[in-house]
Image (tube, helix red, strand yellow):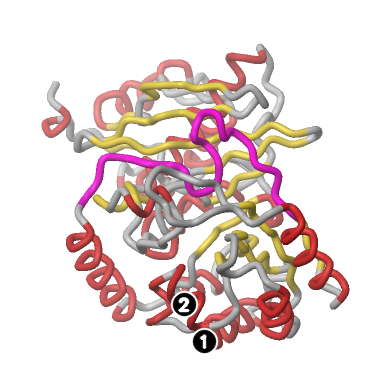
Amino acid sequence: MPAGLDKKTNLLGLDRAGLERFFVELGEKPFRARQLLQWIHQRGISDFSQMTDLSLALRDRLASIAKVAAPEVVREQRSGDGTIKWLISIAGGSAVEAVYIPEAGRGTLCISSQVGCMLNCTFCSTATQGFKRNLSATEIVGQVWRAVGRLREMHGSDRQHVTNIVFMGMGEPMLNLDAVRPTLSLLRDDLAYGLGARRVTVSTAGVIPGIDALAEGVEFALAVSLHAAENDVRSRLVPLNRKYPVEELIAACRRFVDAGHRRNITFEYTMIDGVNDQPEHARALVRRVSVLPCKINLIPFNPFPGTPFKCSSDEAIDRFREITRAAGLVTTVRKTRGQDIDAACGQLVGKLLSPSQRRLTMQQQLARQALSPP
């Protein structure tokens, strides 16, 4: 059946509240949502006939009106360091990428929230490719569902291989709140993926309305792609800064903390030679962020074809780190992973729109969010 003619409700992207509403509309008890969450997300089952604690009549009814369908993986690449990148096909002829990074005692899955990115950050390969559309909750959760299932298959066990999830793939999560909210709910739900707040991180380039909106919801860790503490430098790297300058962004971070989120905010800072890596830049960063409970994550720049930028030298990164540490800030340097398969930070790409279409779409998204209640 052509995709456009399939009218079955896809249950994969519905959180507990969404599933409860679905069952109530069917005339069923809301507790059925608890059963479905466990079957779909904990056991990875998509066939209703295998959900044996449901009545046969309900299983047959669900099969006729609903489905559990994740986007398909079209390519899997493995790095020499163990990193895995999946290219995932989505409706409309495009694709997104998700990356799994295994480490001792943990496994981090980096997921995408949009097809491409509309923010046009000048040091990011993904941004140079343009933007097409937001992902649905099903398409975001589907990346997790596919990764968890594939890792079970690879390792032959039900052990939890994905221990951390970061919204640091393609796109700006704060411009897709309608899909990010239910995804966060599922990731945190003990009947679904059951991840603690410190194990789910949402990264933003500084979309202040999104930070404020998500502050009044499920708890998660916030990462801010800062990259410079002074407006002139940051506007060159992150054009969004012209709309939401650094001082307003820091104020939004303060509101996020004051809303009850107990986790340190992580400030991501890509180290670019001669642009933002000098001692004066480090001292400016200290002045900006010392007012917040935070940590600094320095990211060596990952070059891509056509970029005018170069990665800072090891000496410059070490010097920068020592200045921030001496000021009392917890500072780490991110180890580059998956570079041989273009899976490192800022390297994910897709088939997307032109810069002018991207700018128009961003303006529409920001206007829509400004008019929407939290």
For the residues labelled 1 and 2, say whether their Cβ atoms are less than 8 Å apart. Answer: yes
- Quadrant location, the N terminus: top left
Q: Which mark is residue 134?
A: none
Q: Classify 10 Å Cα crowding around label 1: few (below 14), some (14-19), many (20 and above).
A: some
Q: Earlier in the sequence, mark 1 or mark 2?
A: 2
Where is residue 220? Give x, y as percent. Answer: 63, 60
Q: Residue furthest top?
A: 156
Residue at 48% of width from left, 82% of height from top?
Answer: 232
Looking at the image, residue 346 sits to the left or right of residue 7; the answer is: right
Q: Amino acid at mark 2?
A: Ile
Can residue 18 be seen in the rendering of this structure? no
Where is residue 247? Give x, y as percent. Answer: 55, 87
As displayed, is residue 252 above or below residue 124?
A: below
Mark 2 — residue? Answer: 208
* Mark 1 element type: helix
Q: Main secondary structure of the magenta part?
A: loop
Residue at 36% of width from left, 22% of height from top?
Answer: 74
Where is residue 281? Give x, y as percent. Answer: 66, 76
Kindly report which numbered mark, 1 or 2, lies closer to the viewer in this rendering: 1
- Quadrant location, the C terminus: bottom left
Q: What segment carries the magenta color?
A: 333-353
Q: Nearer the viewer, residue 319 or 117?
A: 319
As displayed, is residue 155 above or below residue 11?
A: above
Mark 1 — residue? Answer: 248
Q: Amino acid at mark 1?
A: Glu
Can residue 155 be seen in the rendering of this structure? yes
Residue 63 drawn in magenta: no
Q: Classify 10 Å Cα crowding around label 2: few (below 14), some (14-19), many (20 and above).
A: many
Looking at the image, residue 50 sits to the left or right of residue 129; the answer is: right
